[in-house]
Image: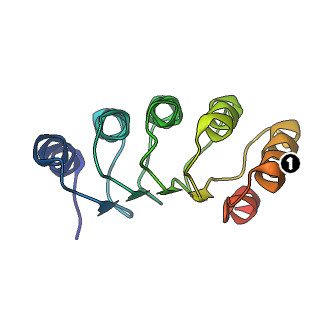
């Protein structure tokens, strides 16, 4: 289905209110601008959400950074796919991965800085149980 920003905002708001959603896939929809921030807010809030996919969803740089920051406070999420986004700063993701005990799947776009790509790849190798990170880095 083709959600626009308004639809994504409504879904994020409903998920915050209901607090029973475990899997959300809004891939291939318009999740830019305020929708990116609303999804980051969903990640930051206490909820049973275990899997979030926003691949090819036009995430804003600010929204990506907010999602990485939200992972510092969310210990329920186990799988997160933000592949095909434009990742300009991988440092927030490094911090999130280091702090997150249960994340086992993280699909990231290729970091624009080769040094950060190496750091992420090394962290993925050291992070027990994390999968899909190296594949996300080659995209």
Q: Nearer the viewer, residue 21 or 63?
A: 21
- Residue 52 position, x and y percent, is 40, 56
Provide the residue designation for mark 1: 122
Q: Is residue 25 visible?
A: no
Residue 128 falls in image quadrant: bottom right
Q: Residue at x 58, y 41 (%)?
A: 100
- If the image is split into quadrants, where does the N terminus sit? bottom left
- Residue 101 position, x and y percent, is 59, 45
| As drawn, 16 above or below 126 | above
Q: Is residue 8 left or right of residue 99?
A: left
Q: Residue furthest bottom?
A: 1
Q: Residue at x 69, y 58 (%)?
A: 133
Colour treatment of the image: rainbow
- Residue 60 position, x and y percent, is 45, 37
The crowding category of the residue bearing disc 1, from other C-alpha atoms within 10 Å (few below 14, some 14 to 19, many at least 20), is few
Q: Residue at x 65, y 41 (%)?
A: 97
Q: Is residue 17 left or right of residue 31?
A: left
Q: How many marks?
A: 1
Q: Residue at x 23, y 65 (%)?
A: 2
Q: Is residue 14 visible?
A: yes
Label 1: which secondary element? helix
């Amino acid at each position: 289905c083709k959600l626009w920003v308004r639809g994504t905002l409504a879904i994020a708001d409903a998920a915050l209110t209901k607090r029973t959603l475990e899997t959300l896939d809004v891939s291939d929809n318009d999740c830019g601008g305020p929708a990116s921030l609303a999804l980051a807010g969903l990640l930051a809030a206490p909820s049973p959400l275990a899997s979030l996919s926003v691949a090819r969803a036009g995430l804003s740089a600010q929204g990506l950074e907010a999602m990485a920051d939200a992972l510092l406070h969310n210990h329920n999420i186990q799988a997160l796919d933000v592949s095909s986004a434009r990742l300009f700063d991988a440092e927030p993701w490094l911090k999130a991965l280091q702090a997150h005990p249960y994340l086992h799947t993280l699909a990231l776009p290729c970091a624009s800085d080769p040094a950060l790509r190496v750091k992420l790849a090394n962290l993925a190798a050291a992070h027990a149980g994390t999968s899909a990170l190296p594949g996300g880095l080659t995209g």
